[in-house]
Image (tube, rainbow, N blue to C red):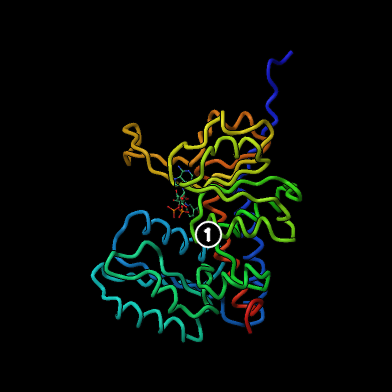
Amino acid sequence: MYDYICTMELLDGKQLSKILKSEIKQEVEKIMAKGERAPHLAAILVGNNPASQSYVRSKVRSCDEVGFRSTLLHLEENITEKELLEVVERCNTDPELDGFIVQLPLPDHINEQRINLAINYKKDVDGFHPVNFGRMVQGLPAFLPATPFGILMMLDRYHIETEGKNCVVIGRSNIVGQPMSILLSRKAYPGNCTVTLAHSRTKNLSEITRKADIIVAAIGRPNYLKADMVSEGVVVIDVGINRVEDASRKRGYRLVGDVDFENVAPKCSHITPVPGGVGPLTVTGLLLNTLKSYNKEVYI
Ligand code: NAD
């Protein structure tokens, strides 16, 4: 006889991303077989932030895996805003470039909003430009922000029921929490949830999260969501990527999510690990947006 039977299913973003990438690769092979050029993604990286360098490397590697062409534009930390705007403009008008991203954060002397607004929304495969954001809100074809897009794919491919569910999104950033709350409340699958968007000024968060069927944690605080904050059978999507010191690791740190995985997981029906959950799907979302741009599925 068992004391405890764990029915929790791990939402394996690494595995799912492999499947999605092999689907993308097949599409690229069909394109190439017709003698046409490969889809092309560029990444603009300013300075030497180690986390940003690692994200960009992973994006370039993923392009290679699926047969995309990729270009890395690595610019000096002290580049002026005007010079960066010129690089953005060159990308905007390059006829052989389907999409590009400007890796955030940018150095303090550069206004991120000004750079974001300068990006041609037809090549905004990160989905951060207000035109894409507005179209997303209205349910029009748009490049969806890569992380929420990846989470939708996760819910879809794992056949997670969302209709009528109480969903709590924690965090209201423009790139994760806010668009996630909009996408989960839209009339679609995945969607049709009753969404609560919680943030740093939310009172009695535990009372809210305990009523949730689905929780998306995008806070940026290690192990913040504890076992006593969730109910049995909840679906937990952990977006957080936090470095915590760990002398036992060669690099001196390890990555943890916003969820106290060890204690929360046994209560869940489904949960994403960190690493290997949402992260790999964010990159896949970016690849899919680039393919959509190439195929002119969003804009002519
Ligand atoms: P952000 O700092 O822009 O936003 C954090 C949000 O959390 C804010 O809206 C804030 O109101 C909320 N918050 C802070 N403290 C809170 C509290 N005590 N209770 C409730 N809400 C609180 O962060 P972001 O860019 O949305 O990123 C969030 C996390 O997700 C970070 O760890 C980041 O590294 C990670 N991230 C991961 C991916 C991925 O691909 N997996 C992509 C983007 C971001």
Residue located 54% across and 44% down the image:
238
Q: Nearer the viewer, residue 32 or 85?
A: 85
Q: Position of residue 278 (x, y in %)?
A: 55, 50
Q: Quadrant of the C terminus?
A: bottom right
Question: Is the CB atom of the residue marked by disc 1 within 8 angstroms of ligand 1's nearest atom?
Answer: yes
Which amino acid type is shown beneath numbered disc 1? Val
Which residue occupies the extreme top position in the image? 1
User: Which SS class for mark 1?
Assistant: helix
Q: Quadrant of the N terminus?
A: top right
Q: Which residue is mark 1?
A: 283
Classify residue 46 by image quadrant: bottom left
Q: Position of residue 82 (x, y in %)?
A: 30, 80
Which residue occupies the extreme front position in the image? 203
Q: Nearer the viewer, residue 36 or 106?
A: 106
Classify residue 106 by image quadrant: bottom left
Tell me if residue 128 comes above or below residue 284 in the rendering: below
Local packing at callout 1 (Cα closer than 10 Å; few below 14, some 14-19, many 20+) is: many
Q: Position of residue 25 (x, y in %)?
A: 62, 65
Left or right of 161, for residue 251: left
Left or right of 4, for residue 46: left
Classify residue 208 by image quadrant: top right
The answer to whether any part of residue 175 appears in the image is yes
Tell me if residue 224 comes above or below residue 150 in the rendering: above
Tell me if residue 102 comes above or below residue 90 in the rendering: above
Residue located 71% across and 16% down the image:
2
Q: Position of residue 237 (x, y in %)?
A: 59, 45
